[in-house]
Image (cartoon, rainbow, N blue to C red):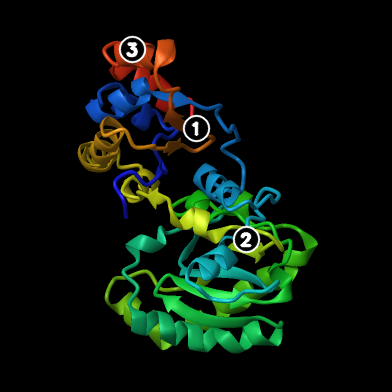
Amino acid sequence: MSDSAPLLIPFASALAEGCRAALRELALPNLEKLLARLQPGEIAAGEPESLSMPHERLLARVAGIDAADGCLPLAALGEALAGHETGRAAFAWITPCHWRVARDHIAMVNPDEMNLSQAESMAVLDAVRPYFEEDGMHITYQSPLRWLARGDIFAGLATASLDRVAGKTIDTWMPRAANAAPLRRLQQEAQMLLYTHAVSDARQASGLAPVNSFWVSGAGALPASFDASAVARWNVDERLRTSALNEDWPAWAAAWRDIDSTACARLLAALDAGREVTLALCGERGAQTWRPRERGGYLNNLGARVVRLVGRKQVSATLEAL
């Protein structure tokens, strides 16, 4: 991908106090220069309780997709990006996962920490597939933590992003709408079915969390008009995701420094070379995009002078607003 490709950085900030403390001590010299020399756009504001993540909403807008919260057809868009024909069919991602059930809440173990193998995932999928098919859903394997489902039930189904629930209490994120009832029933059936499954027994014997449920996300059908190629042009740097979801802020800060010295440095070099560049930063609530200032004249000269004035505090404040 070109060094001047639009750069999107999800999880650029978070609301946790540990993240705010890390931001105040974080030096990102290349990002400082980029923010000083580029023109900021308006913040696409949202709420931390929204079902869709800000970076998901931004990519949907890039593709020309306008949908309600939680109804972004990201699974279908992923198929289109892979070159597969989707038509008007509705798709969703299914993530096999482990729910820890307490007396007063249910929490999801971060699926990335389960170390689920391909063989284990496929064996679990084979066990639950007939139950999905009984409800008119066709489901196929894509990776250990992602199965692809297709069915009319996913049309207009609002679901919470996996990034909202991984490693967290899921009670408030469960789909409650009437059209989600078959999926809630399937989750209950999966818990009973997988309780005594051979994969569960083997994983528990090895001290690993068994698969006892699944999460649905990215549901919906693509509109008649959309532009997947516009999304393909973006460089989405996901190096902050794991540490942010785990709330490991020292690791998150280290990942940010790595992004600053690589992706941000390359984007700055492209800007220095006179190429058009775009930078988008996303947090838990909102997203903001920066593009080149007007060439020549007062604004361009102002940007060259401001680069010396935008420092760590200003960058921290910018990121905290997302």
Near-viewer residue (261 or 160) = 261
Asked if residue 131 is positioned above or below residue 180 in the image, the reply reads below
Near-viewer residue (312 or 131) = 312
Could you say where residue 143 lies in the image, as x and y percent from the top left?
A: 40, 75
Residue wearing tag 2? 73
The N terminus lies in quadrant: bottom left
Name the amino acid type tagged 1: Gln
Residue wearing tag 1? 288
Asked if residue 227 is positioned above or below residue 306 in the image, the reply reads below
Residue located 35% across and 20% down the image: 36
Label 1 or label 3, whichever lies nearer to me, is 3
Query: Which badge, 2 or 1, comes first in the chain's sequence?
Result: 2
In this image, 69 relative to 141: left or right? right
Q: Do callouts 1 and 3 mark residues in contact (Cβ within 8 Å)?
A: no
Identity of the residue furthest to the right in this view? 178
What distance separates the C-alpha of mark 1 from that of mark 3?
19 Å
Asked if residue 267 is positioned above or below residue 216 in the image, the reply reads above
Residue located 31% across and 15% down the image: 304
- Structural crowding at the residue carrying mark 1, measured as other residues with C-alpha within 10 Å and reported as few (<14), some (14–19) or many (≥20): many
Could you say where residue 72 lies in the image, as x and y percent from the top left?
A: 63, 55
Name the amino acid type tagged 2: Pro
Label 2 or label 3, whichever lies nearer to me, is 3
In this image, 136 relative to 204: left or right? right
Give the structural element (helix, strand or loop) at label 2.
loop
Residue located 49% across and 83% down the image: 125
Near-viewer residue (300 or 173) = 300
Name the amino acid type tagged 3: Val
Give the structural element (helix, strand or loop) at label 1.
strand
Residue wearing tag 3? 306
What distance separates the C-alpha of mark 2 from that of mark 3?
40 Å
Query: Which badge, 2 or 3, comes first in the chain's sequence?
Result: 2
Give the structural element (helix, strand or loop) at label 3.
helix
